Each structure stands twice: as structure tokens, then as C-alpha cells.
Image (cartoon, rainbow, N blue to C red):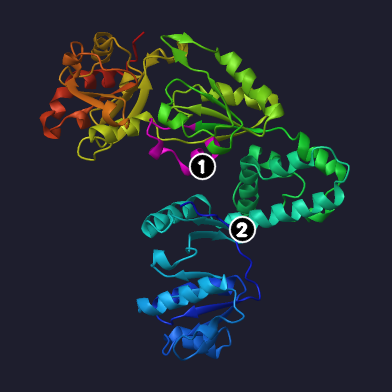
Amino acid sequence: MSLFPMFVKLQGRTVVVVGAGVVAEGKIPGLFAAGARVRVIAPQATPQIIAWAREGKLEWLPRVFSVTDLDGTSLAIAATAAAGVNQAVFREAEARGMFCNAVDDIENCHFYYGAVVQRGDLQIAISTNGKSPALAQRIRKELEVSYGETYGAWLDRLGAARHVLRAKAKGFVGVTGILHRLASGEMFERFLRVEERRTHPDRSQSEGETRTSHLPGRNEETDPSVLTHSDLEVVDKTTGTVFLVGAGPGDPELLTRRALRLLQTAQIVLHDSLVSREVLAEISPAAQVIDAGKRAGQKLLTQEEINSLLVSYAQDHQVIVRLKGGDPGVFGRGGEEIDALRRAGVNFEIVPGITAATAAAAAAGISLTDRRVASQVLLTTFSRGTDGSVMDWGAVTSATTIVLYMPGPDYAEVSARLLHGGLPSDLPCAVVSSASRGGQQMVRWSNISALANEPKLPAPALLIVGRVASQQLGEISENAWNVLQSVETTGATVRVS
């Protein structure tokens, strides 16, 4: 049987609670919050219920339940340890055509108490039709994380703006659209930044934050009642913000809360080919999704075309997400997109993600900076532009962990480059494929010399090189680095292109 969800106004109405134990005590605060008049019927009561009665917050009648106790009441709660009493309350309520809840007694309930997330006037209620209150409580806890306390103040701001728009915007075209835009995820992000500056005025502001903090009705010192028609035009025509979002290594459980919220509120999402299908499934069904990645070495869009699209979409949409595998600032050409957005005067923000280096290390059970053998980490790739074709091998020591992004399918060439750089042939390495992607995840342990003959693992893959990549850390001694140390001593820079 399906339940009808509704929120009931109990202000000034009398609600009878039969029972005054710990269970009944837990049901009463919600009735207080709703403004109900509470009448408790029970021979004995908990100290807290007695205290509420003394304070005049509720009426306590210290006796057993009588059918006349439901006279003039709107709702009944049966919360006794006696099943017969609870059934009697339910039957009388049924006869009178009023609703009754017998706690933890599905058969004697007209309605259930939902697990509730409350943020001011915002209420989110969860029901499992009485099948699993524990599940409802777990979901409530998850929603409490997603919808923080700030939503209460945000709703107050939206309510004030809605009141002003209804009063002042008669004849203004597009009021409904503006109300939806004011309630958008992008506007909420701006509100959070305003609140951050209000509560932490000493913190520095970025250029992007300064630009996006002055829309009408959003500054904490602005009274929404002063909104004018010209203000509404400004809100209606405000350009959007491009969010460069890290999609992480592929498991949607590893997305940041911020990234997930943006994916669920974006109007436009441009994603790379490294973004997993599971992460793409988190995007709002209402969003326009554009694949901007590579397939079989062929680019679907050039970088210049991607830059132009980001700038163009920001003119007509509020939340544009540029979704990149891993972290958007690590080997993702994010710098070029940032430059394009800056030149065009488009607001942007970078939302970090878990980069492939840490995901691959976690998949292999490796500590990249195990203090017994490593003190620094080098993130690099052989797939870079002209300026990146030179690698300073002199900066590599026996305590360096090298993480090679996008090693490609030619392991023999990678092995040759590493050996040419002066690394010991028996230096351990590990190839990690599809890190964090469940059953697809693979790890192959090897060393630099043997790497050339290893079977190829499917992309996306990453190579971890260094003493931390050994399954027995003590097997590589400092003496193995004689060749490399000679390179360090001369300060030579080895070209590997």
C-alpha cells in the first residue's frame, strides 16, 4: 500500500499522547516545534515529562486512558508498553475518523513518524512504510551531511525574495524563471561564499569570489525588499560560473560532496573520456551532457573548441561543469581552460578531486611516502607538450617515488626511458589499471628491467616506480643507486624524448 506524503499544520491543535515513558517523551518535542497543544495521559511519567508539565508546556493527566480523552482533539499518539491500550486508542480514533499512530505497531497506525532532516523551515521526511525505521534513520544521517545548517538561512533568503518578487514584479516577464534561478545550485554556492566572508572576514578573497558576490538580494547587508525591476533584469541576465570539477578515479563513492552537488544541479556538463560511466550516472537527467574526450586516439573536440564552448555556455546558463578524471589541476589541461575563462571574464571555480596517483597507490596498498624508503613524490608523464619532453633526472634520489601518468601501451619504451634516466634496472615498479573501479581493478608488480616484457594492462593505467613499489621494502638497498648518484653528482639533465 502506497502512503500519501503530507506536512500537517498543528499550530493550536490538541494532540493526545497516551503513555509517558521514554518512547512517548521522544515523540513530544516534534509536537512542541509544530505549535501543538500536547495532552499526556498516563499514570506515571518520566522526569522530563513531569518537568514539561510543571513549566506549562503540556498538560499531564496522571490516570489511565479513557475514550473521552479524544474529545476535541486532532491527533492521537499511542506510546505505551501495553499492546491492549495502544489498540484501544487506535480503535477509538478510527471510530471518530481521526488519525492515530501506535508506536512500533504497524497494524494500529494511520500514519508513521518519518525520519526528518530539518533546517529551519526546510523539512525532508523519509518513510519506509514501517518496514525499516533503521534504513530511514541511515538515509536521514546521509541527508543531514548533504543539506547542512546553512540551508535554513538560505531558505529564509529565498522566501524574502519570493515575497518581494510577488509584490513588485507585476508585469515583469520571466518571474518564475528568476525564482528558479535564485534557488539554483549556483546561487546557493554564491550564498555559501557570502556566508563564509561574513563569518570569516579575515580570510582572503579570490578574484572570482569578489566578482560573484554582488547580485541583488544576496549580500548579507542587502534587504530583499529593495529589489527593483532593474535588479531583476540583472539577476535574469547574470552570466554563469564554470566549475572545473575533479571526477576522481572512477568510483562515485570517491566524489567530493561539492562535486556531487554540482553534478546534480548543472545545466551543462562537458566531460573527458576518463570519467567513468558510474560517475556520469550521477549527473542530473535535466543536464545537457557533452563528451569532449578522446576515443581511439581521436579527439572529439579540440582544446580550442572546448574553451570556446565553456565561454559560450556561461552566457546562457548558470552552472556549467567541466568534468575531468582525477583532479582537474593534474595533467588535465585545466590551465589552458582557466586562461581562456579569465580572458573572457567568465567566473570559474576549481573543485579538486582524488588524483590517479593516490587512487592507484590505495588500490595497490602502497604508501607513496613510506618514511622507511621515501621522502618525496614526483608526479610526471611522458605524454606532454614540447616543454615537458625534458625531465630533470638529477632531482630523483633513492628516496623518490615516481608516479608516471598515462604510461601508454609501449612498456618497453617506458622501461628504456627510465633506464636511460639512470634508474637501477631492479628498481621495483607497479602498474595499476582501473584503480578504484571494482572488479576491473588490476595491479601488476615488476621492476624497471622486467617491465618491458610485461603483458599490457587496459587503460586507464598508471605506473608507480620506487622502493615503495616493492612488496618487500628491504630488498632494494642504497647501493643500487650508484649509477643514479653519478648523474646527480654531475647535475646532468637527461633528455628522454
Question: In terms of depth relative to the viewer, which is nearer, 148 or 89?
Answer: 89
Q: Which residues are magenta?
A: 246-263
Name which quarter of the figure residue 268 lies in: top right
- Give residue 135's quadrant in the image: bottom left
Residue type indicated by callout 2: Gly
- Label 1 packing within 10 angstroms: few (<14), some (14-19), many (20+): some
Mark 1 or mark 2, earlier in chain:
2
Percent across and percent down for residue 328 are 48, 29
Corner quadrant of residue 472: top left
Name which residue lies at 55% across and 13% down.
301
Badge 2: residue crowd in 10 Å (few <14, some 14–19, many ≥20) = some
- Residue 292 position within the rendered picture, expressed as x and y whole percent measured from the top left: 52, 18
How far apart are the alpha carbons under marks 1 and 2? Answer: 18 Å
Q: Position of residue 99 (x, y in %)?
A: 54, 69
**Disc marking residue 152:** 2
The residue at 47%/74% (across/down) is 91
Residue 345 is labelled as none
- Camera-side mark, 1 or 2: 2
- The residue that disc 1 covers is 258
Name the residue at 17% across, 20% down: 447
Q: Is residue 315 above or below residue 297?
A: below
Q: Position of residue 350 (x, y in %)?
A: 54, 34
Q: How many marks?
A: 2
What element does badge 1 sit on?
helix
Residue depicted at x 39% and y 39%: 253
Q: Is residue 356 visible?
A: yes
Above or below 17: residue 286: above
Q: Is residue 176 left or right of residue 295?
A: right
Q: Is residue 200 above or below residue 298?
A: below
Kind of residue sitting beneath label 1: Arg
Q: Of 33 and 393, which appears nearest the observer?
A: 33
